[in-house]
Image (cartoon, helix red, strand yellow):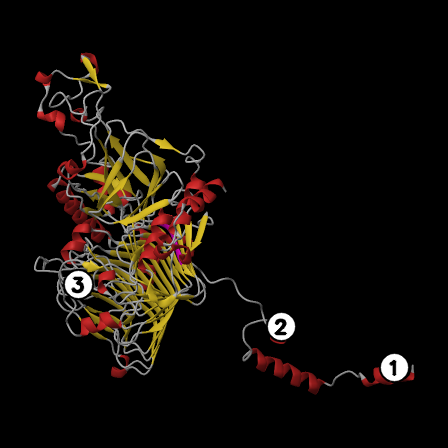
Amino acid sequence: MESDKTLLGACTRPSWALAFILFTLLIFLSFHLPARPVWLLAGPLPGPGPDPPSCSDFFRAVPPRKVVMSIEDFGGVGDGITSNTESFRRAIRYMHRFRNLGGAQLNVPNGTWLTGSFNLTSNFTLFLHRGAVILASQDPKEWPIIEPLPSYGRGRERFGGRHISLIHGNGISNVVITGENGTVDGQGKMWWELWWNRTLEHTRGHLLEIMNSDNVLISNLTFQNSPFWTIHPVYCRNVVVKGMTILAPLNAPNTDGIDPDSSSNVCIEDNYIESGDDLVAIKSGWDQYGITVAHPSTNIIVRRISGTTPTCSGVGIGSEMSGGISNITIENLHVWDSAAGVRIKSDKGRGGYIANVSISDIRMERVKIPIRFSRGSNDHPDDGWDPKAVPRFKNIIISNVVSVNSTKAPVLEGVEGSSFEGLCFKNITLHGVALSAKWRCEFVSGFATRVFPVPCLELRNNSYSSCFPLLVIQLVLVDPLNRIMFLSSNAITLANPAVNSKNVMTCVSCNPHQTYCQRLLHHDVTRVHILYNVKPNQNILSNQNQFKMKTKSHFPFLLMLLIPFTIQHICSAECDNLKDYCPTTPPQKNAIFINGLPCDNPSNTSAHDFKSMELSKPGSRDNFGSLVKIVTASKFPGLNTLGLSIGRSDIEVDGLVNLHNHPRATEMVFVSEGVLVAAFLNTQNKLFQKTLKAGDVFVIPKGLFHFFLNRGAQVATVFSVFNSQNPGLGSLSSIPSDTLESVEKIKRKIVSLSDSQLRGVDDLTEAVLDIIYS
């Protein structure tokens, strides 16, 4: 108790002097402490904030793939030396069959997988495990030449076609390219040297190009050393590129990081890029070709991008922008040691527009020119460009920019004859700029003399989407020559004249620039109307469907080639025909029966009876990936009594004509196109097998079971001749041919065998039937 009293006695009332000192201290601290509760300073650190904003929901999630296989299942070898081109192509073609059956995933395990270009398919995932490297072939022949883009009219660097990308997709949907930071290496040095030496024959290929596609995710990988632009989505919608590392030597020419081109709903975020060109470049076609195609880039978000490019810009818009660019958001960009931070560029002849662009929260270090509006390189695809086609610029807001150690002031350089409206620069901080931060503005003829025609606040209060709708209705115009043209949203008035054009592109809330919007609307509809009248029989279709270019296949009529094989005849009594011919008669005119089919009156016979077009196109498809058609005398009158039937088989890559026999005929096959494994089993189950290529002939004795397997890189076309006008068709009743799972097991088993393994197999019956019966 005594100690307690002592302690209590020490707690005396403070003096007025001490109270004054404490009051003064509190007043002092109130001017210097941050504007937050004092208890936060002494308490624990706050937890992580909310997730940063993301546009990744542009990609619609897909369910797990039903079929998952490894590139090793298709003969792939990851030693960095063995070519895996055919393995990748075979794998994709195999998985193409599952595009409507739950999709497929191809895994690339740890290793270095050398390959030429290959195409993707829909409802497909390409997954690179940690340590996996897809290494691009340095043989130009493994980068085939494809048609130029319609909105460019030619290769971007050279006339004519262009090399296909290493990984390519056209007309696909619901595709994921991802992994555990695996790598795709384009080995671009060979291509860069061709460019430097001016010996390049065709435009270089991209590392990844996706065309005419929807719902694509590219994430969590490293792409490096691309021959040309690295990632190029063109004529696409709903594309997300997220969490990528893109690397190229800083002197590598034209190795742009990500170039969305004539695409909509594109999300590019959380990527690191080192490049010899723009980190991100937004495009929409080149001069008169881009104007004609009129497929704009719209609704594109670029955020949280960091990187460096010593010759170009962090984000560039243009200069190929002839189809129009609108509704662009660029934010949280970090660029260093670069030629420019943000650049908007165009030229005479481009036409088009750049409108409704918001650029904010940009940090730059040692960037030569932080903000640059300028002309491009003044290049044109050919002499057909229109000098009167000038670009238009409207509603571009740049705010919250910090540039440290820049060497030049921002540049605003116009294009003669073009219009600039509604440019707003707000909260721009420049340090270490030459010219004492005095901006250099070159107002050439046509550049609006009012750079800031209205206060920035008024610009921000206007709705961007009022002039350029967030939902752009794209149409596809297909002409009789199978060329595809993409039209602007204004063309909806052609498909449905009852639709008021202002419902598509309204300008009610565009004040004070409503006149501009009306002029743009009138110009575009007039141009589209002219295109439509040129070819009035064209079809207008929504691009929400998938389209495939129509191609015509010409198959030679092989009657002369088949004649040497017709050495055996079937007859009832005589071994020679008693007449020159005996075409079948129509059923209502039955006269006399010979060899099972009636003969027509010889006076009615004509040359038409001896010609058939039944084999000019494939037959019906089965579950094994083959299309088989056999033509007998019942469909080809001239064959009657000649002891012949003919057939055609079109077999998809890795497709199988299942085990079957012809009890009444020997079959002789002639390979017209492709590579084919043909085999038959004798009555002791011994396998007789050969790999056939175009021009080869193989004979299958009467009644023996046989099968065909396409092991080539293209559809195989086989013509057959049978020494019976009714060869018959038999199959092993125990084979569940209607069960897709068993079918796929058979194909997978045979596909997984290498050529050397196949050559070493004397009896494939057990290997195949074990799978069938499992």
Q: Which residues are magenta?
A: 173-177
Instruction: Please identify the quarter of the rendering in which residue 37 is found.
Output: bottom right
- Asked if marks 2 and 1 touch (Cβ < 8 Å), the reply is no
- Residue 176 lies within the magenta run: yes
Pointer 2 residue? 44
What's under tag 1, amino acid-wise? Asp
> In the displayed structure, does residue 383 sit left or right of residue 193?
left
Residue 320 x/y as whole percent: 20, 61
> Mark 3: few, some, or many residues within 10 Å (few <14, many ≥20)?
some
Position of the N terminus, as image quadrant, is: bottom right
Closer to the camera: disc 3 or disc 2? 3
What's under tag 3, amino acid-wise? His
Secondary structure of residue under mark 1 = helix
Q: Magenta-highlighted stretch: main secondary structure?
A: strand
Pointer 1 residue? 4
Pointer 3 residue? 202
Q: Earlier in the sequence, mark 3 or mark 2?
A: 2
> Mark 2: few, some, or many residues within 10 Å (few <14, many ≥20)?
few
Q: Measure how far apart labels 2 and 1 are at the Cα level.
A: 34 Å
Q: Earlier in the sequence, mark 2 or mark 1?
A: 1
Secondary structure of residue under mark 3 = loop
Instruction: Please identify the quarter of the rendering in which residue 568 is found.
Output: top left
- Residue 210 lies within the magenta run: no
